[in-house]
Image (spheres, rainbow, N blue to C red):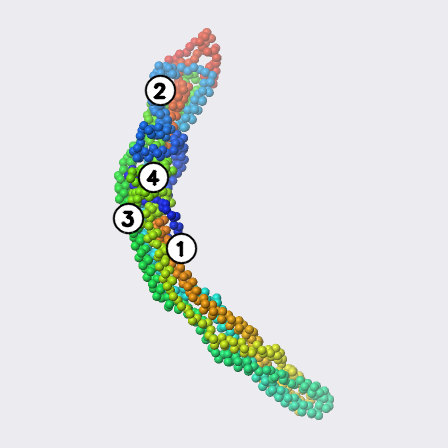
Amino acid sequence: MARLLCFLLLLLGLCGDLVSGGQPSAPRPPDALNYTLPTAKYRIQQAYEVGPIGALFRMVHVFLYVVQPHAFPEDTVRKIIQKKFEPSVDYEKVVYYEMGIIICSFLGLLFILLMPLVGCFVCVCRCCNKCGGKMHQREKEDMLFRRKCLGAALLVISILISLGIIYGLVANHQVRTRVKRTRRLADNTFRDLRTFLNETPKQIKYILAQYNTTKDLAFSDLNNVNSKLGGEICEQLKPVVIPVLDDIKAMASAIKETKEALENMKSSLDSLDSGSEQLNRSLTDVKTSMEQSLNDPLCLVPPGMETCNSIQTSLSQLQGNSELGQLPSVDAELNKVNDVLSTDLDGMVEQGYKSFNDIPERVQNQSSAVIAEIKKVLDSTGSEIDSVTQQLPIKETLDNFIGYMNESEKYLHDILPKVEEADSYWWLVCLIICFLLTLIIIFFNLGLLLGVCGYNRLATPTTRGCVSNTGGIFLMVGAGLSFLFSWILMLLLVVAFIVGANMEKLICEPYANRKLFRVLDTPYLLNEEWKYYLSGLVLSKPDIKLTFEQVYSDCKDDKGIYTTLQLQNRFNITEQLNIGQHTQKLVREFESMNINLDGIVLLGDSGKRNLQEFSECGIDKIDYASYLTQTGKSPTKVNLLSFAYDLEAKANHLPPGNLKNSMKEAAQNITAIHEQQVIPMEQSLVTLHRSVKTLQRTSGSLQGVNKTLYSLDDAQNFVTRNISSIIIQETKKFGRTITSHFEYYLQWVEYAITEKLASCKPVATALDSTVQVVFCTYLTDPLNLFWFGIGKATLLLLPALILGIKLAKYYRRMESEDVYDDDVETVPLKNVEYGNNSYHKDHFHGVHNPVLTR
């Protein structure tokens, strides 16, 4: 066990805290990177839970604190370790610290010395009929009360003694059970330590493997420099360039739409001009023909006269809209628009779009050489990181302790069978002690039980029954066994008390509050030539402050071995990685990236002149109101269809003949004129109306031409002036993106090595398992609970035997009893109670002395 504890303390020395500089915090990962160092799963996850019995252990701890309230004697322990302890000088300090234990031990020794001596005197005295040995009981008035009080007191003490025995049995069982668990706990502890040692190379491989992940991500960004860098440049220009190009493209569409509207308008005007002239001729011919037919004699006599007059009156309505043929022509405007369209404005706009969209490709072509150099830098950085990681002394340092661990494990496996064998003897001795106490309590309880059950209130002391007498004898036997064995038990308990109390106060308690570590951390304590033992052992630099307490605390916090060992004093990972140096190489390469995007032309001069000419084409000066007014009118003054239907109806009122036939023919001709000439003119008017509306709308865009030209000039100037600064800005941003991947990786490497690599919590857990669990919880606490419970039971035997002896006289059969007589002056003249009956002095005559054997 001593070798195992030494090994764990040495291994714990591999895990301490950095004392210079702040601890590196975990870097914030980019969106695409997030590393998690793999960790092993250990069998022992947390501290051992004592369970409900912990309340009993805490009770013993409170008792020990009352007995021994003094602080841990650090100075004295240091002198003992340094072999500078001088009994003549330091004796008083030791006595002062051990005063409580010395007093308790002295009381125990008094008990050991006086108990057999008093027992011997009582035995001799009672054999001489002294000290209550005479089998005679004097009758008193409070006998009933005294018997009940003695019985109740003995019962309470018996219960308390039984509790003490139960404590002893529980403690004995705990030792038995825990010792059996020690082998499995030890195996799990060593397995966790081996896992801890074997996990470190896997973690180092993982750290190296993550560089490839980071490099692949950077290579992906570099291979897509057209979208990553060129796309970002486009995004900076897009809010300025694209709206202008969109406006010009919309203007080109408006020019085409204007041409189409002017052509439709010209066609409609020509159609209306020719149609109006032809319509007037056709209506004139029909009107002349009808006037000739109305000269018929039938129109001079009724009833045809009225019809003819009505027809003659309506002939004035047969006229066309002469204004339709007088609408102004749009040939001049159409010619100007055709001149504008002679230049391919759409092609020029598309060329502007192409010049803008070609930026990513131009960026990729111009940066290919620099990208290749950056990739070389990244490859060389990976080799340097691999070299730095391989130089870490962590694995080498851990390998040095594998031998210690193997030796400790072998020693433990050799000693455990001996411990288990010793535990068997301990268990048997404790069982015998508990059996003896249980036997004594059984006699006391049987005596009390038989005495109470067999007591007859009507019987006199000399006539008590056999059951009552047996109960009294059992009480005397219990008292005799108490005299016989209690001092032997106390002798064993004093030894257990001294050992267990000092184990708790000198090892377990200072280990829990870490004062034991502070003692071990005393400069020049374990080695007179080393100021700090751990730093001299691990770092070969004893002046560096590396302490057991710091080591234990950091291992409990699950920190990495690099930090705990303060290995920066042997190999400074920060200087070796030199994050700034690696990132500066990348920055210099990006600064050498020369991208030239000159020559971006959004729209040439011919396109600008084209737009200017369109703004001067004159469509904004057309009198659209007059056109719209005429398009709202009919080609004729009357609806020819209605006129024809009315004419035919009037003709039907005429008498048969040439006049009637000519009127019907005229109605048919008017209907034909409507279908063949009026309807096409109406369609031309609809087309003219739509074209005028279109031109009216597009003419409004002419006002925006100048604004578009101004925006175009501003956008072109913005591109010309700012393209270089945008390229520099986005190149730096792209470079920061690439370098941030590696900066994060290098920061994570430093953080992982200093904080997480070979996290040493299993070492602290192993030390806790050895000291706190095995030594304190498995051994010391049950040992202390045993002497506490059995000691309490043994001490209570003293009042129990006194009460048993006193109470036995109330149950045993006496050889003589008090007799009352009037003639005898020596006999008490008062009532005597036997059971529940009182006998007056007149009832007794003479002396009754039955001969009874004791």
Residue 304 is left or right of residue 110, and the answer is right
Placement of the C terminus among the 4 image quadrants: top left
The residue positioned 41% from the left and 26% from the top of the image is: 157
- Nearer the viewer's eye, disc 3 or disc 2? 3
Q: Give the percent coordinates (x, y) of residue 209.
A: 33, 56
Mark 1 or mark 3: which comes first in sequence? 1
Number of residues whose C-alpha sits closer than 10 Å to that of mark 4, classed few (under 14), some (14–19) or many (20 or more)? many
Q: Is residue 170 visible?
A: no
For disc 1, the marked residue is 29
Mark 4 or mark 3: which comes first in sequence? 3
For disc 2, the marked residue is 118
Q: Work out how far the residue at label 4 is from the one at label 1, CA to CA, in angstroms.
A: 39 Å
**Which residue is farthest top?**
823
Q: Is residue 123 above or below residue 266?
A: above
Number of residues whose C-alpha sits closer than 10 Å to that of mark 1, classed few (under 14), some (14–19) or many (20 or more)? some
For disc 4, the marked residue is 521
The residue positioned 26% from the left and 40% from the top of the image is: 411
For disc 3, the marked residue is 396
